[in-house]
Image (tube, rainbow, N blue to C red):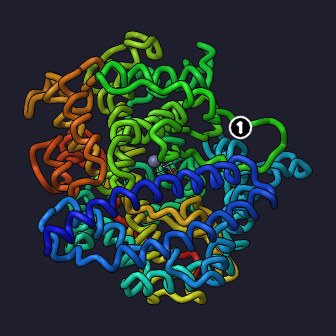
C-alpha cells in the first residue's frame, strides 16, 4: 500500500516539478522585464502573471497535500514533498496577495527612482543611488557634503516607503500564518533547517565582536584626527555619513586616508583598472576565466546575449542593484548590473558570477532543489573567488598591481583593506535582520520603526545618524534589501562561511597550511587549481537537495559554521590593531550617542 503510494507520489512529483519549472520561468521573465525597465505596463504585467501563477500553485498545492508524504520511506521524495508543502505567498487570498505585490513594487520603484540634488550644484537633482549617490560616498571627504547626501537619500528612499513597508509587513505576516508560521521571521529562519539557528548566529557574532571593536576603534581615531573631535567623538559611536558608504555597511571608502602604513603602495586597483581601459565586459570575461581555470563552467552564449552589464543611457527607470537570475529552463541565466570601473564593481562582478556558476552546476537538479544549500551558500561562492583575486599575488599576475614589497607592513595594509570590507560588514548584516525579525514578530511597531533601528545600529554596529531622527523618517528602507523584500542574514552567514570554504580550498590548492606563516590564508590564490575547483563543484552540484551541513562537509570536511576561518584569516591584523590601539590609548567600544533618534 505504502509502496504504491510512494510510487504514485514519485510520478506526481515529476509532473509537479515540470509544471513549476514553467511557472518559475514565466515569473522570472516578467520580473526581469520590470526590473530592467520600470513602466506601468511591466508592473501590471508582473502583477497579472503573479496572480495567475498563484492560482495555479494553489491548485497543485491542494493535490500535493493529499499525499501521506510524512510517512514516505524515500528520504529524497519526502524532502521534495516537504519543500513543496510550503506554498508561500500564493496561499494568500487574491486581494491580499495583490496588496502585498503592490506594496513591494511600490517600495522597489520608489528606491529605483529616488534622486537627490548635488551639494555643490543645487540645481542638478538627477543623482540616483547608482552611480550618483554611491560615487559621492566613495570619493567625497567633505563632511558637510556627505551629511547633505546622507540626509537627502534617507528622505527620498527611506521615509517615502514607510506606509508601503507597513502594508508589506501585515500582508506578509498573513501569508506566514497561512503557511503554518507564527510570522515571517520564523519562516525566514526556517530556511536554514537548523533548530538553534538564532543562537548559532549570536554565538558567531560574540566570537568576531572583539575583532570588530578593534577595527572600529582604529577607524574612529583616524576619522577624529581628520574631521575633529566635535564631529567624531573620542569614545562615542561613529557618525554614519563619514564611513565611505551610504549605509556604512563596508568602509573601504576611507581606506586610502586611514591605512596603517600610508607610505606603502596602494592596494586599491581602481586607478589601474581605469588607466588600463578596463570595460564592464572585461570584468565579466576575467571572472569567467577564473571559474574555467578551476575546471568549472564557462558562460553559455545566451548569458552574453541577454545580460545587462551597464546602465542603459536611454533614460529608463530600472533596478540598478546588481543581481543574478536563473530562468529555470536550464539554458537562460543572466546578470543585471550597472557596472562602473571601480575596485568595488570588480569584486561585485565575481560575486554575481558566483551565483551564475551555482545555477549552472545545479541546473540538472529537480526545480525544487535549484537553490543554495542555504541562502548563505549562494552569497558565498563568488566572494570566495574574490578572496583569491584580491590578493597582491593575483593582482600582480593579471598586471593590476606593480611588483612591490611584500613585507609585513604591506601585509597589514592588505589585511586592513580586506577588514574594512569583511569584518566591518558583519555587524551591519547581522543587525539588519535582527531588526526585521523584531518587526515581523511585532516587538517593533510602526511608531518605533526608526527608534529601534538606530538602537541596533548603535548597540551592535557602534554608529550614529549624522543628525537627529524621528518617526517621520524610515531609514531602514534606504537600504535596497529592505525595500525589495530580500532577506539579509544570508550575507552575514556568507561572510563567515566563505572563510571556511577558502581555507579548505587553499589547502587543496597547496596554497595554505595551518601555522605556516609563509603560506598565509590571506595570501592564497586558488586560480588554476582543479582540485580546489572539483571540491567546489561537488558542493555546488548538490543545490538544496541535501541539508546544508552535508554541503558544508563536502567542501570543508566539517558540518558546522564557525568563525575560526575569519579569525584565522585576520589574526595578524587583530594582533596589530590591539597593539596599535594600546599604543595610542584608544578607547575600545563606544559610549551612548548624544544624537536624539528615539
Ligand atoms: C551584490 C549583491 C547582490 Se546578491 C548584494 O546585494 N550584496 C553583496 C554584498 C552584500 C549585499 C549588498 O550589496 O548589500
Ligand atoms: Zn549575491
How far across and how far down the image is residue 574, in percent?
Answer: 24, 45
As helix, strand or loop, the secondary structure at mark 1 comes to loop
Q: Quadrant of the C terminus?
A: bottom right
Q: Residue at x 66, y 41 (%)?
A: 135
Instruction: Tell me which residue sits at (14%, 27%) in the image.
Output: 508
Question: Is residue 515 depicted above or below 359 in this figure?
Answer: above
| Residue placed most toward the observer, 228 or 259 | 259
Find residue 83 and report its horizontal and vertical position in percent: 32, 67
The residue closer to the viewer here, 543 or 182, is 543
Examine the image and state in which quarter residue 388 appears: top left
Residue 244 seen in this snapshot: yes
To which residue does mark 1 refer? 311
User: Which image quarter: residue 390?
Assistant: top left
Q: Is residue 122 left or right of residue 334?
A: right
Residue 418 appears in the rendering: no
Graded by Cα atoms within 10 Å as few (under 14), some (14 to 19) or many (20 or more), the crowding at tag 1 reads many
Amino acid at each position: 500500500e505504502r509502496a504504491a503510494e510512494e510510487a504514485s507520489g514519485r510520478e506526481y512529483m515529476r509532473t509537479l516539478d515540470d509544471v513549476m519549472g514553467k511557472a518559475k520561468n514565466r515569473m522570472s521573465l516578467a520580473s526581469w522585464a520590470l526590473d530592467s525597465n520600470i513602466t506601468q505596463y511591466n508592473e501590471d504585467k508582473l502583477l497579472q502573471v503573479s496572480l495567475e501563477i498563484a492560482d495555479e500553485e494553489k491548485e497543485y498545492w491542494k493535490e500535493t497535500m493529499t499525499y501521506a508524504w510524512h510517512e514516505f520511506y524515500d528520504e529524497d521524495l519526502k524532502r521534495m514533498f516537504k519543500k513543496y508543502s510550503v506554498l508561500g505567498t500564493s496561499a494568500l487570498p487574491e486581494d491580499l496577495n495583490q496588496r502585498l505585490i503592490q506594496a513591494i513594487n511600490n517600495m522597489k520603484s520608489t528606491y529605483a527612482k529616488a534622486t537627490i540634488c548635488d551639494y555643490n550644484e543645487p540645481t542638478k537633482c538627477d543623482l540616483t543611488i547608482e552611480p550618483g549617490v554611491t560615487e559621492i560616498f566613495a570619493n567625497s571627504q567633505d563632511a558637510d557634503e556627505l551629511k547633505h547626501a546622507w540626509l537627502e537619500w534617507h528622505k527620498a528612499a527611506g521615509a517615502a516607503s514607510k506606509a508601503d513597508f507597513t502594508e508589506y509587513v501585515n500582508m506578509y505576516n498573513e501569508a506566514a500564518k497561512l503557511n503554518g508560521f507564527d510570522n515571517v521571521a520564523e519562516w525566514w529562519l526556517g530556511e536554514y533547517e537548523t533548530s538553534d539557528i538564532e543562537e548559532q548566529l549570536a554565538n558567531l557574532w560574540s566570537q568576531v565582536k572583539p575583532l570588530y571593536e578593534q577595527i572600529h576603534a582604529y577607524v574612529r581615531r583616524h576619522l577624529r584626527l581628520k574631521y575633529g573631535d566635535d564631529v567624531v567623538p573620542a569614545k562615542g559611536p561613529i557618525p554614519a555619513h563619514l564611513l565611505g558608504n551610504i549605509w556604512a555597511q563596508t568602509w573601504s571608502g576611507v581606506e586610502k586616508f586611514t591605512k596603517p602604513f600610508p607610505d606603502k603602495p596602494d592596494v586599491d586597483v581602481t586607478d589601474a583598472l581605469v588607466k588600463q581601459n578596463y570595460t564592464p565586459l572585461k570584468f565579466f570575461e576575467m571572472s569567467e576565466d577564473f571559474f574555467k581555470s578551476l575546471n568549472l563552467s564557462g558562460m553559455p552564449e545566451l548569458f552574453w546575449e541577454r545580460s545587462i552589464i551597464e546602465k542603459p543611457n536611454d533614460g529608463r527607470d530600472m533596478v540598478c542593484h546588481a543581481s543574478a537570475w536563473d530562468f529555470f529552463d536550464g539554458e537562460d541565466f543572466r546578470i543585471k548590473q550597472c557596472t562602473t570601473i571601480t575596485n568595488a564593481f570588480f569584486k561585485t562582478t565575481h560575486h554575481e558570477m558566483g551565483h551564475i556558476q551555482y545555477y549552472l552546476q545545479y541546473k540538472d537538479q529537480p526545480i525544487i532543489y535549484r537553490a543554495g544549500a542555504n541562502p548563505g551558500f549562494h552569497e558565498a561562492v563568488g566572494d570566495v573567488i574574490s578572496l583569491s583575486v584580491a590578493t597582491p599575488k593575483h593582482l600582480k599576475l593579471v598586471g593590476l598591481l606593480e611588483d612591490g614589497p611584500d613585507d609585513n607592513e604591506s601585509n597589514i595594509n592588505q589585511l586592513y583593506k580586506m577588514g574594512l570590507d569583511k569584518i566591518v560588514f558583519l555587524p551591519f548584516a547581522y543587525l539588519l535582520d535582527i531588526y526585521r525579525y523584531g518587526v515581523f514578530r511585532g516587538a517593533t511597531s510602526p511608531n518605533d520603526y526608526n527608534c529601534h533601528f538606530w538602537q541596533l545600529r548603535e548597540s551592535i554596529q557602534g554608529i550614529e545618524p549624522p543628525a537627529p531622527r524621528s518617526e517621520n523618517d524610515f531609514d531602514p528602507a534606504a537600504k535596497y534589501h529592505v525595500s525589495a523584500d530580500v532577506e539579509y542574514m544570508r550575507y552575514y552567514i556568507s561572510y563567515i562561511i566563505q572563510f571556511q570554504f577558502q581555507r579548505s580550498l587553499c589547502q587543496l590548492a597547496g596554497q595554505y597550511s595551518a601555522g605556516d606563516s609563509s603560506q598565509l590564508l590571506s595570501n592564497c590564490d586558488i586560480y588554476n587549481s582543479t582540485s580546489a575547483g572539483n571540491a567546489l563543484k561537488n558542493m555546488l552540484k548538490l543545490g538544496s537537495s541535501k541539508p546544508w551541513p552535508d554541503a558544508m562537509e563536502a567542501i570543508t570536511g566539517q558540518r558546522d559554521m564557525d568563525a575560526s576561518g575569519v579569525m584565522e584569516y585576520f589574526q595578524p591584523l587583530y594582533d596589530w590593531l590591539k597593539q596599535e590601539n594600546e599604543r595610542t590609548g584608544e578607547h575600545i567600544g563606544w559610549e551612548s550617542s548624544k544624537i536624539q533618534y528615539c
